[in-house]
Image: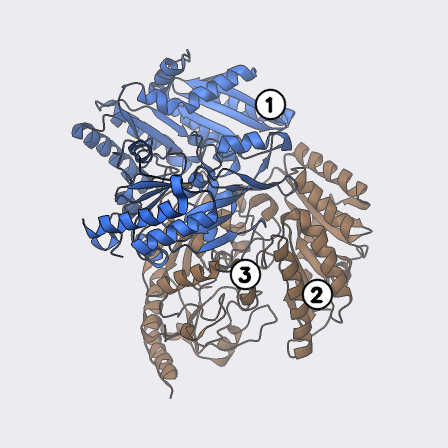
Chain colours: A brown, B blue
Amino acid sequence: MSKQTQSVAAAIDELKALLGERLSQSMAVREQHGRDESWHRPALPDAVAFARSTEEVSRILAICNRHRVPVIPFGAGTSYEGHLIPVAGGISLDLSGMDRILRVSAEDMDVTVQAGVRRKQLNEYLRDTGLFFPIDPGADATIGGMCATRASGTTTVRYGAMRENVLGLTVVLADGRVIRTGGRARKSASGYDLTRLFVGSEGTLGVITEVTLRLHGRPEATAFATCHFATLKGAVDTAIQTIQMGIPIARVELLDEVMINAVNRYSRLDLPEQPTLFLEFHGSAQGVVEQARAVEELAVANGGGFRWSDREEERGRLWRARHAAAYAAKALRPGCENWATDVCVPISHLAEVITYIRAEADKSFLPAPVLGHVGDGNFHMAIVVDRNSPEEIAEAERLNRLLVTKALELGGTCTGEHGIGLGKREFLLQEHGEGVAVMRAIKQALDPSNILNPGKLFVPVASDVAGQG
Amino acid sequence: MSKQTQSVAAAIDELKALLGERLSQSMAVREQHGRDESWHRPALPDAVAFARSTEEVSRILAICNRHRVPVIPFGAGTSYEGHLIPVAGGISLDLSGMDRILRVSAEDMDVTVQAGVRRKQLNEYLRDTGLFFPIDPGADATIGGMCATRASGTTTVRYGAMRENVLGLTVVLADGRVIRTGGRARKSASGYDLTRLFVGSEGTLGVITEVTLRLHGRPEATAFATCHFATLKGAVDTAIQTIQMGIPIARVELLDEVMINAVNRYSRLDLPEQPTLFLEFHGSAQGVVEQARAVEELAVANGGGFRWSDREEERGRLWRARHAAAYAAKALRPGCENWATDVCVPISHLAEVITYIRAEADKSFLPAPVLGHVGDGNFHMAIVVDRNSPEEIAEAERLNRLLVTKALELGGTCTGEHGIGLGKREFLLQEHGEGVAVMRAIKQALDPSNILNPGKLFVPVASDVAGQG
């Protein structure tokens, strides 16, 4: 038995004593915790620990840190960048059982939840308060996972991302110490912004167990429209001009013609197979009409056909189809996976970047529908690949590299919302240069034994191996 | 000559060779760089270095790091917490000469400036673009200083604080390395959020030399009103209800009767000497009227007298008086200074906290007018003290401790916008507990010799002494 294997066995013994049946080594459970929704190859954890409280997480980490065994936080399993794949083995720490809503204040419009609460569960809970939690990454992710990846999504153009909507966190550090960051005040200048440091740290600096979130008032009125265009540029320009005019649109989602085709098939719709915007407006009854009319004018000037959807039922069907777009893309090639690109660029460059990569992808042998949160300058190309085919992976890598290189040239980022995980580690370096050395210094200071989600975010170097930090 | 004195002398020799006359040892210049606008006692730097570029800052830091000589970044000198006072001597690094606006994009609504640009200068520059930079801490601070202290102010209720409005930074690290954090994309999930780590780091982790900021569209229309109340509670409740109703007010500033009295005297006004709200609304011509009418209704129900100010000239006079309120407070006792408290609490607790401390202060022998950004739950008590009187300092400390303790009990923070600096170091520990150990670990990782603004943020311990890290 190798030294690493011995350590893992010893840690598992202690974890069993602590958790009983909530420490699982069954193959089915390990397999379920070894894969996400991305193209990345699954890998097995040695065991899965199901935690129920911050104190338990603290004990689990203290044990694993002592034995230098990797710990990979697990929420809903909806990562797109392999965040939760135990590439170095170790313990998958499942927080989905920590699903209690701890307090809510309608007066202060905030809520504190355990990390395993899912966003739909939270909004269901809030239904009678007149408040809602708007961040919508598509998947029904856990709030803890959304913090860890700095998630955003369809409503960020209006309500901000997790970065803006997390007020405070409870975090368990690698050695089991528990800290509380931030607080309930709307702003603070009290010390380093640890909240923002842990938001987006991808489980590499600590395990988030509780989250205090800002809530927002439900809009008095909502309006919805779709708008299809003869050209991709017409659709993107409409989105850009909407933002530049300061119209406070709540959602502005682009689906290109390839994606509309996939969505039509998957969700049994008959949308015109053209580049299309899904638009949503929040405000007063009069306000939403004013906003929508203003966008309609822009759309028409850009060659678009603007179509109001007044009926709740139709609106629900269309948004469900939008949210299922990733599955619709996959369904183009059964048995294949999405390689989701994720660049975000200054909005003035958005049309240039999308039309560039659309033209490149059209020359490729892989289907690659585009969808995006274009109001933020963020979009995804869902390259549909067989992950067992080296040729296909190489082709997806080639397309993604073209796209990221272009985005970085234009002041953008390699990932708007999915995170670095396994798939964009080399681009982290390309994007931030010497800044990555600062990130590594922080990682080293907070997790000297490198037990927290090792292999993610940074391209591994020899000294990173867990247990040898 | 002590070892420290020798090091400083050696560093100064090298800095002179680098900067020529832009390295000053004149007493007048040192004195000017040894004090801020707070009650904290001045202290002298050994010399002042006037930097012109990021590269120069990099060389200055490399020299000082080699000799383990403290470096204290200096902008406009408007700190309220002693941030720029060289308590351990060393080099005051004056960035006010780095005052160029490097680029602006009206299309992307962003701008990149050198750290020494002042906020009024920036808005003057932007005048013809239809855009503005809204963050308004009162003083005409530098953008770099506003980043370093995580500033906010009167418009944060509508436009956010520096935390929300900084897109990216150029930062020089302690050893002279230069990093660029963030970028121009509106959102990113690419690695640790170093931008937010340096925003609010008070010059202790690096020297900010360039800043990319979000800009906002100038509102189509602006409305302004004042509203005086029989009771403090009436005024605060009106502010709270305004926020809770989701009225997107641009400014809602409270001045209590003691502050109105001071402002009347200082700015020669004749406002009724009652608790008063200064209100500003931004939006469409119709929107601002709707917003103001809604607030008027709340104010009247809370016993307030609502007074529109239609004339631009009157509005300007009133805002100038508001911005001079700190000076008005000081003028109550010529030769004295403001001890500015700065708590921020969840808004549902705001009335409780303000009425509590108002009653305590009314029993004190020190004048202590209150003003605040009440829409955020943030307010200041300007305790006017003779800083040479130990009794007065002790009394101000007593009042501030009562206030901070109450705010922390209610989920608030010891500082909403002024920062920790020298004055709130013990409360940092009270507020964050073990989190301070994490902050110290980060400080140690990025500035192992503790040359960057030593003595600020953390209660010094023996190992903190610059040159002995």
Q: Which residue is mark 1?
A: B289
Can see residue A112?
no
Work out whether residue A293 or residue A203 is closer to the camera in this orientation and state it: A203
Frontmost residue, A191 versus B374: A191
Q: Nearer the viewer, mark 1 or mark 3?
A: 3
Residue that appears at 27% across and 43% down: B89
Residue A96 coordinates in the image, percent (x, y): 47, 64
Instruction: Please say if the residues under marks 1 and 3 sit with CB atoms less than 8 Å apart.
Output: no
Q: Secondary structure at mark 2?
A: helix
Q: Chain of mark 2?
A: A
Q: Are marks 2 and 3 on the same chain?
A: yes
What residue is shown at x 36% (from left), y 62% (from top)?
A446
In the rendered structure, which amino acid carries the disc numbered 1? Val
Residue placed under numbered mark 3 in the picture = A419
Asked whether disc 2 touches disc 1, contact meaning CB atoms under 8 Å apart, the reply is: no
Indicate whether A444 appears above or below B238: below
Residue A11 visible, this orientation: yes
What is the CA distance from the residue labelled 1 to the residue labelled 3?
A: 43 Å
Q: Quadrant of residue B362?
A: top left
Is residue A319 toward the left or the right of residue B346 in the image? right
Q: Quadrant of residue A469?
A: bottom left
Q: Secondary structure at mark 1?
A: helix
Please, what is the three-letter code of the amino acid marked with disc 2? Ala
> Horizontal placement of A284 versus B72: left or right?
right
